[in-house]
Image (cartoon, grey):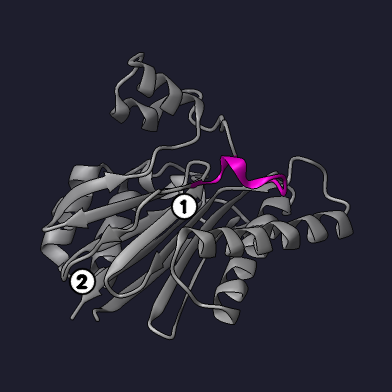
Amino acid sequence: MMNTLVSLLTSPGGRKVNEDYCCYAEKDGFGCYILADGLGGHKKGELAAKTIGEAVKEAFTASPGFSPDYIKRYVEHARRAFSTVRDQSHANSNMKSTLVVLLIDGERALWGHIGDSRLYHFRCGKLVFQTKDHSVPQMLADSGAINQDQIRFHEDRNRLTAAFDGSAMHRFVIINKAVDIVFGDVFLICSDGFWEHITELEMESDFNQAKEPEKWLYLLEKRLLKRAKSGNDNYSALAILIDR
């Protein structure tokens, strides 16, 4: 059974309100790592992300486990909590959020996501997997109209094709089979305000220099702050290193 080293970073960036929310819980040999990026403005995004993130964590803590069904159970709990809060706050239909949920049982990893917050999986310092955004530019990249790298700067990058809005979960994508993990594997979960400023090659390079999550996020944030313009988006990240 392997352990995890975890570091968390979240910032409002150049905005007054931070509509990102990230958290994690570890219990009974299982870990649950969560990131949500709220949409809707007028603090509705902040409320959406916090409600969803806390609800997933609450459901995991009450019943920790590891399977696609457990992820579905946690996300369904969040969907009900979100719908209740939205109705009580009289929020309009623009109240939405992205969501990434990662489960680890010490030997395997499972994850699901919706929206354009991303999960990256690195092994031996190299990227081996990243989630696909639910966005218009991702659709263009999938069709060959643009390169994957062009998503970061595309004029329609903020146009999502799916987001967590309290409706049925059919757009929430969960991988079909758990991934075996080994010592040294590292996961990065981050909002678009984070990954838009940092390439995957830079993520690899900085991790190979840092070797541990806290310093890795520090180095990545330094890059971000050098490139971000005034009024830049909120940015958040969770780094999870599989340790002995």
Discs 1, 2 touching: Cβ within 8 Å:
no
The image position of residue 69, as x and y in percent, is 53, 60
Residue located at (56% from left, 78% from top):
63
Vertical arrangement, residue 6 with respect to residue 48, above or below: below
Residue located at (74% from left, 49% from top):
42
Mark 1: secondary structure: strand
Please rate how many residues cluster around mark 2, counting C-alpha atoms within 10 Å: few if below 14, some from 14 to 19, many from 20.
some
Residue located at (24% from left, 69% from top):
215
Give the residue pinned by disc 1. 112
Which of the two marks, 1 or 2, is nearer to us in this view? Answer: 1
Type of the residue with mark 1: Gly
Mark 2: secondary structure: loop
Residue 212 tag number: 2
Splitting the image into 4 quarters, where does residue 108 fall? Answer: bottom left
The image position of residue 72, as x and y in percent, is 57, 58
Quick one: 139 or 61, which is closer to the camera? 61
Q: Is residue 51 left or right of residue 222?
A: right
> Which quarter shows the C terminus?
bottom left
Quick one: 91 or 196, which is closer to the camera? 91
Mark found first going from the N terminus, 1 or 2 = 1
Check the image and name the residue furthest to the bottom: 28
Number of numbered labels in the structure image = 2
Residue 164 visible to the viewer: no
Q: Is residue 28 left or right of residue 20?
A: left
Residue located at (16% from left, 57% from top):
123
Quick one: 49 or 75, which is closer to the camera? 75
Check the image and name the residue furthest to the top: 145
Task: Name the dominant secondary structure of the magenta segment.
Answer: loop
Bounds of the magenta segment: 163-173
Type of the residue with mark 2: Glu
The image position of residue 200, as x and y in percent, is 24, 44
Task: Kindly report the distance in space between the C-alpha atoms of the residues bearing marks 1 and 2.
Answer: 24 Å
